Image: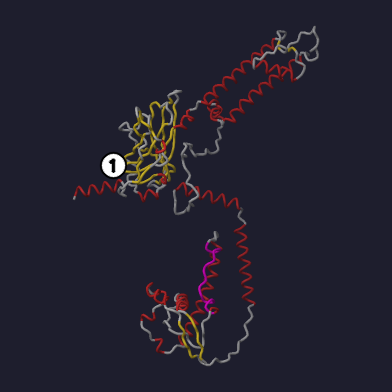
Amino acid sequence: MISTVAFSRETILSVKCSRSSVKNEPRRNSIPPTQTLTAKHLLAYLPRPQPECIRYNPYSYKAAAKSTVASMMTNKRASLTHNLNFTNSSSLPPSQEEASPSQTQSPCSQTPQALTLVRQDPPHQVTIQAAPLETVDEAPKPPRLHRSINLKRFSSKWQSIGSVGNSIPTAEKLRLAKTYKKRCKLLGDEHSLHITAGNQRQRYVTKDGKCRVNLGPISEKSRFLSDIFTTLVDLKFCWFLLVFTTCYILTWVAFGGIYFLGAWLRDDIAHVHDQQWQPCFENVDGFLSALLLSLESQRTIGYGSRMVTANCPEGVVLLMIQSILGSIIDALMVGCMFVKISRPQQRAQTLIFSKHCVICERDEKLCMLFRIGDLRASHMVDAKIRAKLIKSRQTKEGEFIPLEQSEINLGYDTGGDRLLLVEPQTITHVINENSPFWEVGPERLKRESFEIIVILEGIVEASGMTCQARTSYIEDEILWGHRFESCISLEKGAFRVDYSAFDKTFEVQMSQLSGKQRSTATEKEITC
């Protein structure tokens, strides 16, 4: 019986690649007789991809159990494939078994050029003369009762393990994940924490100068009451108004109640319309009239219908106490309101910093530059600039120091940190042996995790109060090989500042070596 089978070499190569992991068999150019490979037979022995539930499973014990089952199934398939290969090789003629080393090489180990040539061959037909098929009585399949029972037991155990893993509350999982993420960010461990593009690294100081540090639970809160003025000034404006409104209302109600109690004890309420009665609190016939007396007395309104008479000395003393207390509240509110409105933090809103910090060459030295400017015509007096480097590190003894602060020299020894802030100034930090960026190059700059805090201090010319403006630059906001564009031009009779070009930079051609590498290369050139 002669049968014609159409196939391509790609199918044979894929089958051999799947079998090469078990045993390297000689390459065959034909299908062995008595067996014809079909898609149904190939599917049973091809390696199956690992499902996503195993690859991305957060529970290690589940992954271990599934990997055990997968290894058992792989061993079973390997044994079946080995038996099939052995049967196929035994049915081949001896001339085909004795092949050259190039022919016995597995297709998976061939070069890409060889694979490309094989794949480009068009499919052809091979005529195979097969032996007469013998009728084989199919043996009845043995019962699979025990295997089903074992699988059921394994699945029940699996479900019990999964139920234990799923019993962890979602809030607890989120809390643990958040704690781990914060720890990785603090340690700067980029390998343990994979941050997506949408998430931003936590700053120590924001771009507008706000410090992102939350104070923990404070047991001695009475310390804030010892400095009540600063506590009131630091309150938000809505809470500030609420506190003083509450103070006024409480004093009015409290003294109104005292006036009402005094009028009731002296029986002035019962003789309010008696012309012969000499009252202590005139025209007080209830709590509402007593409240009006308290409000008119404290605010010095004095309509004339209600008053404290000279018939009782305690009424005069009570009026004196209320007047003194009302004056204290007025003075405290006026002082706090004035300080809160004229706080120097509001002046810092018109002091601007460049969005990026650049590293370029200036006078044959590697320098770090950034810009500052003042938008107001009234200038800062005695302006000074300084910078801090915030970076966590570990000492040689193994001690971890979080958020360590180190000084960045901005010209303290030469007086370059004292500014006449009339036009935008470009602040320069020379990267030398004493600089924390001495060994930092463009590649290492991308891997580092630090933050530069820039602080500008000065005296406000209008009020004479000290003002402080802050900003920060992280490693992603430092541009290597860039320079600021000029924003000052000469006009008729004056200089003109173009603040639209304040943040603009342009790229320059410069070496990619760090300051230390530059110094080493220069020394080698001098030596040679």
Q: Position of residue 287 (x, y in %)?
A: 75, 20
Name the amino acid type tagged 1.
Lys
**Residue at left offset 28%, top offset 42%:** 365
Name above or below for residue 58 compared with residue 2.
above
Q: Quadrant of residue 108?
A: bottom left
* Residue 308 shown in magenta: no
Q: Position of residue 253 (x, y in %)?
A: 69, 22
Q: Secondary structure at mark 1?
A: strand
Q: How many marks?
A: 1
Q: Can the viewer see residue 418 in this picture? A: no
Q: How is the image coloured?
A: secondary structure
Q: What residue do we see at 66% from left, 21% from top?
A: 251
- What residue is pinned by disc 1? 365
- Is residue 235 rendered to the left or right of residue 391? right
Q: Is most of the magenta stretch helix, strand or loop?
A: helix
Report x, y in % for residue 112. 38, 72
Magenta-drawn segment: 41-55
Q: Residues within 10 Å of mark 1 (few under 14, many from 20)?
A: few
* Above or below, 130 relative to 144: below
Q: Residue 429, percent across and down? A: 34, 39
| Frontmost residue, 407 versus 148 | 407
Q: Which residue is situated farthest in the top direction here?
A: 276
Q: Is residue 53 magenta?
A: yes
Q: Which residue shows up at 36% across the image and 81% down it?
A: 101
Q: Is residue 164 left or right of residue 411?
A: right
Q: Is residue 315 left or right of residue 211?
A: right
The outermost residue toward the front is 492
Q: Is residue 28 visible?
A: yes
